[in-house]
Amino acid sequence: MEWVTGVLAAEDYEVGRQIVQRGVAAVYLIAFASALNQFPALLGERGLLPVPEYLRRAGDRAGPTLFRRGYTDRRLRAVAWTGIVLSALLVLGLPQAGPPWLPLVAFLVLWGLYTSIVNVGQVFYGFGWESLLLEAGFIVAFLGSDEVAPPFLVLIMIRWLVFRLEFGAGMIKMRGDRSWRDLTALDYHHETQPMPNPASRFFHLLPKPLHRVEVAGNHVTQLAVPWLLFAPQPLAGIAALVMILTQGWLVVSGNFAWLNTLTIILAFAAVPDSFYAAVVPAVDPAGSYQPTPLWFTIVVVLAVLVLAYLSRQALVNLFARHQLMNASFNRWHLGNAYGAFGSVTKVRYEVVVEGTLDDAGPDAHWREYGFKGKPGDPARRPRQFAPYHLRLDWMMWFLALGSERGWFTPFLVKLLQADPQTLGLLAEDPFDGARPRYVRARIFLYRFASRREKRETGLWWIREPQGVLVRPASLRAESP
């Protein structure tokens, strides 16, 4: 059976394996750190959407989770810290230095721990990159350790994941907003994306003809290039580099959590070691591998067969007339459908939350709560947070589009209570921990300041009031 394990070995992908294993582990570390910092306030025992209440309602529909028999914030922190420590060990490459089963178990534990979090995360974990991270962690578990050559079948499954991610995003754009088809999408996208970063205004103000070129290049990268991932080398490696370059462009121009970063990491599964040696001849990653154990080969083949079977609905979805975007077809988040920005918002609305210590009359002095990432103070330059994910800030973007889903009223109540956990999610509490008498939410139209407006005013944003979303509300029984 030695010829079988030899055929499945990909000895020219050691650098790619190191990048993929350590990179995916690093993203897991960020994801568990995000859960540690934000989950209790958003979804904990006293959170906006408490997990215990959700589990009572959802029952088995919640999917597999370690919290099935009872959720506590203490257990959540134990899960998060375990994930952080294990992820850090994988980033350092310590499990990979052992036998093949060691990184296999380590990544599967990460996948299980994070599945437990995602399956009770409700709307705050309803993002495509959560399922992407889960599926990536499961597949990467079968890449083996430094003792054996990377399994070629696993590298193919990673490329299949990248293909679904890129091609799915391309197809959802062509089927969705007309602005993608007439090449005008980037006239709006950089300004209206969920959380602009420091460079987003620069990209927005680029000449419109260049925006057309960007959109056309995006279509080529997402609709044509992904097919080359399954071509012989050097075509597969070149295709991967093209996608790495375009995903890097998205990293520079916006805050999309770890979506783009993880895509870049996974694309290295198609870049052979010969590419690195061509740039730096001194690089010679090839080592003397031990023969791949038969048991590991069997495990890899079975895992690939399972993944291929679970991907069948995602394959059909890619070519379906009513394509689903960011959908999981099973409770384990394997074989998912992906896609992003099938529609582009043409104008940017922001919900601004304010409080006052006064009566809610015409002379009340209202003060604005500051969020960490979402636009607020027009004079504040957007900040870079990705690949870290600010979940509350992202939900505020959806709120401005009319999607609330039950969390915003509890959020306002927490502000009225001056809840320390909730205030910890914000950048600025204008009352320094004191309880406001009233809170309200107003809607503003935001746009990036032009170059002239920026020079004259120093403002990054120009905003105009559009109305009231929530009238002044208090914890008192009487109306204001």
Image (cartoon, rainbow, N blue to C red):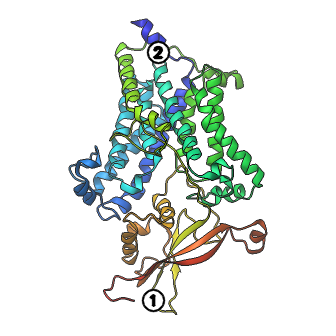
Is residue 286 depicted above or below 207 in this figure?
Answer: above
Q: Where is residue 5? Give x, y as percent.
A: 43, 12
Q: Where is residue 246? Give x, y as percent.
A: 65, 41
- Secondary structure, mark 1, is loop
Q: Amino acid at mark 1?
A: Ala
Q: Amino acid at mark 2?
A: Leu
Asked whether residue 159 is in view, the answer is yes
Question: Residue sitting at 63 percent across and 49 percent down?
Answer: 180
Q: Is residue 315 left or right of residue 54?
A: right
Question: Residue sitting at 45 percent across and 50 percent down?
Answer: 127
- Secondary structure, mark 2, is loop
Question: Which residue bears the numbered disc 1?
Answer: 360
- Quarter of the figure that contains the C terminus: bottom left
Give the image quarter of residue 466.
Answer: bottom right
**Pointer 1 local density, CA inside 10 Å: few below 14, some 14–19, many at least 20:** many
Quick one: label 1 or label 2, which is nearer the N terminus? 2
- Between 321 and 300, the one lying in front of the other is 321
Question: Residue sitting at 27 percent across and 48 percent down?
Answer: 61
**Pointer 2 local density, CA inside 10 Å: few below 14, some 14–19, many at least 20:** some
Q: Is residue 51 left or right of residue 39?
A: left
Q: What's the CA distance linking mark 1 and mark 2?
A: 71 Å
Asked whether residue 311 is in view, the answer is no
Question: Which residue bears the numbered disc 2?
Answer: 8
Is residue 205 depicted above or below 248 in this figure?
Answer: below
- Quarter of the figure that contains the N terminus: top left
The circle on residue 382 is none
Q: Where is residue 322? Give x, y as percent.
A: 47, 45
**Count of numbered badges drawn on the protein:** 2
Q: Is residue 110 left or right of residue 75?
A: right
